[in-house]
Amino acid sequence: MDDKTILEHIHQLVEEEKALRAGHHGLAGDDRTRLQQLEQQLDQAWDLLRQRRAREEYSESPETATERSVNEVEGYLQ
């Protein structure tokens, strides 16, 4: 997967997130679950993109970057 593909995936997830949020004043049930999944997938995609760019910056192959688990990505300190 290349950077362009990852960015396209991020944009698709963001559009779905916007549509979900715009359709409701308060989310419940399946919509809340889906929103949480979208947020986790976005975090994973951004992490993968950052890994790829860091590898390129240090003359390493961006293809060696791998998607990390939700638990790992969500556990980062901000």
Image (spheres, rainbow, N blue to C red):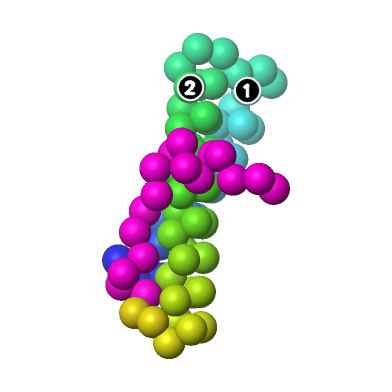
Q: What percent of the width, then of the height, locates residue 76?
A: 59, 45
Residues in magenta, as a range: 62-78
Camera sees residue 1: yes
Question: Would residue 2 appear left or right of 74 to someone viewing this image?
Answer: left
Tell whether position 76 is magenta: yes
Is the N terminus in the top left, top right, bottom left or bottom right quadrant?
A: bottom left
Question: Would residue 38 appear left or right of 22 to someone viewing this image?
Answer: left
Which quadrant of the view contains residue 48?
bottom left
Q: What percent of the width, then of the height, locates residue 74?
A: 54, 39
Q: What percent of the width, then of the height, locates residue 55?
A: 44, 76
> Helix, strand, or loop for circle 1?
loop
Residue farthest toward the bottom in the current orientation of the protein:
59
Camera sees residue 8: no
Residue farthest toward the top in the current orientation of the protein:
29
Tell whether position 54 is magenta: no
When the figure is inspected, residue 5 is found, relative to residue 76, above or below; the finding is below
Question: Would residue 25 appear left or right of 17 to someone viewing this image?
Answer: right
Dot 2, crowdedness within 10 Å: few (<14), some or many (≥20)? few
Residue type at mark 1? His
Please report the residue visible at 56 percent of the width from the left and 13 percent of the height from the top. 28
Residue type at mark 2? Thr
- Check disc 1 and report the residue beneath it: 24
